[in-house]
Amino acid sequence: MSTSKRFTVGWLYPDLMNIYGDRGNILTLLRRAEWRGLEARVVELQRGAVGGMDDVDVFFFGGGQDREQALIYDDLKEFKQESLQNAVGGGAQILAVCGGYQLLGHYYQTADGERFDGIGLIDVTTRAGKKRFIGDVVVVTSIEGLTPSTLVGFENHSGRTFLGPNAKPLGKVLSGRGNNGSDKTEGTVQGGIIGTYLHGSLLPKNPHLADHLIGAALRRRGDGALSHLDDSEELAAHGWILQRAQRR
Ligand code: GLN
């Protein structure tokens, strides 16, 4: 099949950075590409030198506890950083959740004061607080043209992330804590990178965000138009979480 019909998801550290159902994001990206007639495939990007990162359309970097983050942050700098920078520079997209999100920034500092260097692809810094933020989150997103404009998910993190001048929030928190529980922001959008604290997994209940990532990645090949899908079930799940949050 020609490369223009191929859609590749690059899954960073699937054995270590994959908690609270994050693999559901991989399945959603693959199925939604297949339903558009693309040949969807996933490339697992484990620790060590890996090939094929320049073929990836969308990278996924899931969440992980401090222990797992400690196991991979050196590898991220040594073996993945340059290829990720080049890929995003060429129009690939990255979706990073929680632990993965934190390590795309400048650093993540644990509650014990241990600092894990990030790769600085996004202008954020994160320090862990004493209390974990756990629960449902509803966000109004700042991404133009997303319908609905809300995103729903589940958070479980100790990190408090603060955005620098080159990053903008993924959205405004309507319920839950988001980036840091104080400035009402959630996540980060910077170039082709989306960082977020929304586990759940995120994309099955936010199909509009999945299509945003798929379409943006395909546009680099000159073909970002996606056929319409019946998302009534997915959006019913989305709406149920919205209603539940409003009842609280
Ligand atoms: N260990 C990080 C924190 O506690 C990330 C956790 C996660 O990925 N859910 O903030």
Image: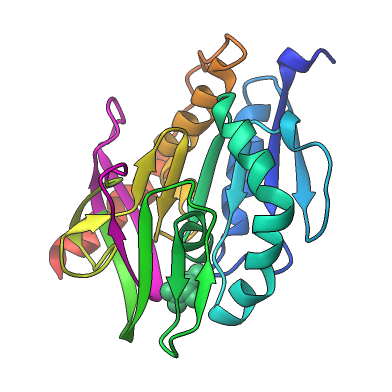
Classify the position of the C terminus by image quarter.
bottom left
What scheme was used to colour the molecule?
A: rainbow
Quadrant of the frame with the N terminus:
top right
Q: Is residue 13 visible?
A: no
Q: Which one is nearer the viewer's eye here, 147 or 218?
A: 218
- Give coordinates of residue 213: x percent, y percent: 50, 33
| 10, 203: nearer the viewer | 10
| Residue 146 shown left or right of residue 1 in the figure | left
Q: Quadrant of residue 105?
A: bottom left
Residue 188 or residue 247, whichever sits in front: 188
Pinpoint residue 53: horizontal percent, then vertical percent: 74, 38
Magenta-span inclusion, residue 74? no
Q: Which residue occupies 54% across, 54% down?
A: 119
Is residue 75 placed above or below 133 in the rendered structure?
above
Q: Is residue 163 magenta?
A: yes
Image quadrant assignment for residue 106 = bottom left
Q: Which residues are magenta?
A: 139-168
Query: Can you say whether 84 is above or below 147 in the image?
Result: below
Which residue sits at x=39%, y=61%?
197
Residue at image position (58%, 9%) is 222
Determine the image quadrant of residue 86: top right
Residue 10 seen anywhere in this rendered image of the structure: yes
Q: Looking at this view, name the residue that lies furthest to the top.
A: 222
User: Residue 186's spot in the image, x, y percent?
Assistant: 28, 55
Instruction: Give coordinates of residue 65: x percent, y percent.
Output: 55, 77
